[in-house]
Image (cartoon, grey):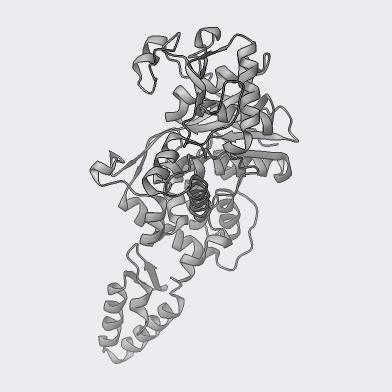
């Protein structure tokens, strides 16, 4: 069996992956808060952990892998969006979940095995908070229930932060009812016009951190294999998950391996609305960027390194995928390249895997290319529609015929006219002794070829 090695954030080392139960490999990834469209940065962990999901399914069998990714559908941001728009919260969350799934599927991401919504696990959250309170790890104050950080000696181990650093690191709400500035909310009171549930502490709603602990426990158990997410969640979210989960379930390990992806930039700068470089996945898709191209670009950088989205990468990615799809068209998948599999098994080395795909394409191994690319979620039949629109075989044959005729008559006007029309449509013309190759560029517009 393929040996998988993953970089574990908790131990800061690359470790051989050994699941608790090879017949039920369990993966949990923090999902979105559903109040708006997912931006490109939100898509990176989806694509990264989709590759891990595919790898685990390949190694252990699809029926032996359980992947859970949640939806946070009760949150202050959602409440504010409802107030601003005048629309019901249920309508906003349902619509946003639909958007999210459509956009992620457009990037070739498989649906996780389970996609729990926080509001459907409130009972489990109340039960866990009650256990923490009974065990002396939580206390009630002014209608809130807070986790007592000092009750968990390991707090800070995951992120490697000292208490001083954690307090200084923002995102820590200071409130007069806290015994310790680091204590975090497990339950808070709801206003009459806000979503709320009855609890031993009055009508209220859960804090953000308790949601993932309760849902992962309900679906994966007290101890499971892998927990993933962006490194912006390491503190405080993941740190708090560890604390409350281990205290609620003494003796459990919670997650045995932690994986965190780095953040995304655009043209070398942090993505920001103020810089005008902020866009959603939907924006790119509407602009005509194929989801497969977005996926390819995201996988071109190792997940533990900052990823820079650039127009050049997008254009190069589209050209590469067009060539690969032309090579693999009509070809049944062969065997997955051992080099591709080994690259992915080495801490999801997607750049290394893509380098091997280039080698397979150069060698003309269409069957191996298709099978190996599919392991990365590329060159799948479901995602090929965009490239089909760019099949220029017939036009290439016609231009080759015009050139052959021109070689006899010495009149190249028809050849030049067709080349100009192709260039205007965003098609690169490559002529050689072997024949004519037409390569659509990122600005390719099939509509401009209708008269040819």
> Residue 333 at x, y = what percent?
63, 59
> Residue 111 at x, y = what percent?
60, 48
User: Can you tell which quarter of the image residue 332 is in?
Assistant: bottom right
Q: Tell which residue pokes out farthest to the front in this image.
A: 192
Q: Is residue 225 visible?
A: no
> Residue 148 at x, y = what percent?
52, 11
User: Can you tell which quarter of the image residue 253 is in?
Assistant: top right
Q: Tell which residue pokes out farthest to the right in this image.
A: 23
Q: Is residue 268 visible?
A: yes
Image-based side of 39 in relation to 311, left or right: right
Image-based side of 318 in relation to 419, left or right: right
Q: Is residue 435 above or below residue 207?
A: below
Image-based side of 245 in relation to 104, left or right: right
In which quadrant is the C terminus drawn? bottom left
Q: Is residue 161 above or below residue 225?
A: above
Give the residue displayed 32% in from the left and 48% down from the top. 310
- The image shows a total of numbered marks equal to 0
In which quadrant is the N terminus drawn? top right
Q: Is residue 137 above or below residue 336?
A: above
Give the residue displayed 57% in from the left and 20% down from the top. 201
In terms of depth relative to the viewer, which is nearer, 25 or 315? Answer: 25
Give the residue displayed 62% in from the left and 50% down from the top. 336
> Residue 142 at x, y = what percent?
48, 16
Give the residue displayed 60% in from the left and 59% down from the top. 367
């Amino acid at each position: 069996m393929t040996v998988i090695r993953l970089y574990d954030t908790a131990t800061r080392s690359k470790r051989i992956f050994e699941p608790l139960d090879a017949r039920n490999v369990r993966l949990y990834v923090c999902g979105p808060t559903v109040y708006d469209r997912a931006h490109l940065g939100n898509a990176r962990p989806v694509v990264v952990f989709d590759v891990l999901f595919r790898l685990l399914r390949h190694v252990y069998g699809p029926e032996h892998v359980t992947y859970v990714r949640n939806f946070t559908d009760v949150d202050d941001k959602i409440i504010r969006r409802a107030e601003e728009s005048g629309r019901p919260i249920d309508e906003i969350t349902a619509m946003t979940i639909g958007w999210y799934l459509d956009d992620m599927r457009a990037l070739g991401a498989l649906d996780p095995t389970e996609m729990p919504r926080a509001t459907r696990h409130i009972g489990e959250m109340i039960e866990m908070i009650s256990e923490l309170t009974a065990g002396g790890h939580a206390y009630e104050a002014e209608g809130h229930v807070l986790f007592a950080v000092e009750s968990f000696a390991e707090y800070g181990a995951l992120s490697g932060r000292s208490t001083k650093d954690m307090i200084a690191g923002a995102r820590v709400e200071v409130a007069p009812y806290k015994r310790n500035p680091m204590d975090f909310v497990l339950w808070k009171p709801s206003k009459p016009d806000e979503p709320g549930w009855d609890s031993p502490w009055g009508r209220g709603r859960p804090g953000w951190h308790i949601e993932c602990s309760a849902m992962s426990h309900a679906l994966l158990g007290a101890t499971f294999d892998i927990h993933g997410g962006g490194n912006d969640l390491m503190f405080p979210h993941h740190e708090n998950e560890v604390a409350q989960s281990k205290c609620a379930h003494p003796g459990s390990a919670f997650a045995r391996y932690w994986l965190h992806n780095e953040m995304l930039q655009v043209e070398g700068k942090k993505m920001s609305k103020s810089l005008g470089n902020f866009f959603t996945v939907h924006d790119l898709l509407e602009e005509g960027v194929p989801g497969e191209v977005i996926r390819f670009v995201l996988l071109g950088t190792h997940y533990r390194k900052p990823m820079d989205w650039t127009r050049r990468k997008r254009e190069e990615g589209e050209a590469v995928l067009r060539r690969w799809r032309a090579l693999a068209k009509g070809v049944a998948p062969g065997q997955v390249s051992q080099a591709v599999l080994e690259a992915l098994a080495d801490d999801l080395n997607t750049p290394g895997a893509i380098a091997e795909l280039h080698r397979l394409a150069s060698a003309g191994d269409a069957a191996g290319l298709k099978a190996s690319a599919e392991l990365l979620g590329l060159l799948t039949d479901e995602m090929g529609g965009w490239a089909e629109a760019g099949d220029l075989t017939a036009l290439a044959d016609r231009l080759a015929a015009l050139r052959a005729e021109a070689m006899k008559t010495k009149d190249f006007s028809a050849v030049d006219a067709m080349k100009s029309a192709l260039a205007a449509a965003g098609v690169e013309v490559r002529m050689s002794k072997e024949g004519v190759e037409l390569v659509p560029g990122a600005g390719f517009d099939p509509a401009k070829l209708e008269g040819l």
